[in-house]
Image (cartoon, rainbow, N blue to C red):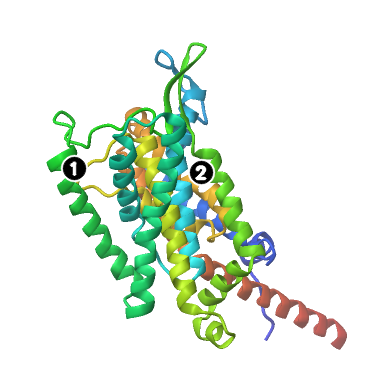
Amino acid sequence: MKQKVDPLTKFFVKLLGNEKHQKFTIPVFAIVLSLIVGAVVIAFLGKNPLSAYWNLLQGSGIAPKARYAGGKSMLTDFFSFMNYWTPMIFASLSVAVALKAGLFNIGISGQMLTAGFITTVMIGYSTLSAPIAKPLVIMIGLIAGGLVGGLIGVLKYKFNINEVVSSIMLNYIAEYIIAFFINTKYVDPVSRQSKAVSDASRLTLMNVQIGDLKFEIPLGIILAILVAFFIRFLFEKTTIGYELKAVGANGKAALYAGINVGKNVILAMTISGALAGIAGVTYYMGYFASIQPKVLSSTGFDAIAVSLLGNSNPIGILFSSFLITVIGKGSTYMSSTAGLDAEIASVITGLILLFSACGAFIQYKVKRGKDRIEDAAKQAGNGKEAK
């Protein structure tokens, strides 16, 4: 029986069929699909999807607004966006490192909070000068996050406690213990949050006057980009990275090959926790200058979507985190301008995660389509020979 291939299948195979490029084309295709579905949702609510998406870009400093307040411009908005973007990069890299080793670190928000609180108390409330305080904030945040992540790795290796369970439990432990200390010792009676950290310790330079404009300059953004390239180098060019990936691919085979699986599980979670710790200090001592009790940052959870969207590739994460941060940062301006609830941004983020999770299915369908086209071509060739 002669097999026919519909034009739509041919189109998608031509678009997504190159296996070398699928790690880029399929995520982009998933993003486009999610934005289309998001546009349908926005249109169903009686709003213009194009205007709403444009508002997201305006709120992130990527597109110009109709007017600006004193000291503000498109450039100052973009610097504010980068300040918000910085902890997202670190948090997403944290997820990626764990995933490469076959682990799922869902406790990033708790590790961020722990690192942020410890550095706040130790450095944020001190009288240290900026050249000493700022590097110490990074170092202590890295150590604090790494210790929590390492603990999860030890529980996984020594007692076979699933890292998802232990990391969720540690999230709650950190949330309520830190809330207790803030409310009893460090609370600001006006804001009901922790007292603001000193400007010398803060990882964001606030209200920097350049000409007529006032900037907030994130000091961690360059470090975040450098760390992304370092993590890529670690996994692609080093023995440590190879062993971590081998453990993630097949733990039993890695053990048979002589790789110390336990050591690598603990190491992966320690590195993941350390990156989450840096995310925490750039968030609580950078973007914010205080901690709200009994609240876990959504950045740690959004980072899961970002890492999946970037295929756990550090360079891909730079782009995927940029996109998700645009949606998150621009949601407030979209809400005030387009009259949409800010939660629509979370819906769009959720759609991106949903379609990204279907990446393997899309790849499978494309392969099936290629096979059908090849079979049809063979049948056509056999028919010509028969004639």
Amino acid at pointer 1:
Ile
Dot 2 falls on a residue whose secondary structure is: helix
Q: Residue 258: where, in percent of width, then height?
A: 57, 84
Whether residue 55 is visible, yes or no, is no
Dot 1 falls on a residue whose secondary structure is: helix
Q: Which mark is residue 141?
A: none
User: Where is 260 relative to 212, above or below?
Assistant: below
Characterize the local packing of mark 1: few (<14), some (14-19) or many (20 or more) Cα atoms within 10 angstroms: many
Q: Earlier in the sequence, mark 2 or mark 1?
A: 1
Numbered label tally? 2
**Residue under label 1:** 182
- Residue at the image position 47 percent from the left and 31 percent from the top: 131
User: Where is 219 relative to 21, above or below?
Assistant: above
Question: In what quadrant of the picture does the N terminus appear?
Answer: bottom right
The answer to which image quadrant residue 110 occupies is bottom left
- Residue at the image position 22 percent from the left and 59 percent from the top: 173
Amino acid at pointer 2:
Phe
* Foreground of the two, 139 or 114: 139
Q: Residue 338: where, in percent of width, then height?
A: 36, 31
Image position of 310 (left or right of 21): left
The residues bearing labels 2 and 1 have C-alpha atoms spaced at a distance of 32 Å
Q: Residue 383: where, in percent of width, then height?
A: 81, 84
User: Where is 31 relative to 152, above or below?
Assistant: above
Whether residue 376 is visible, yes or no, is yes
**Residue under label 2:** 322
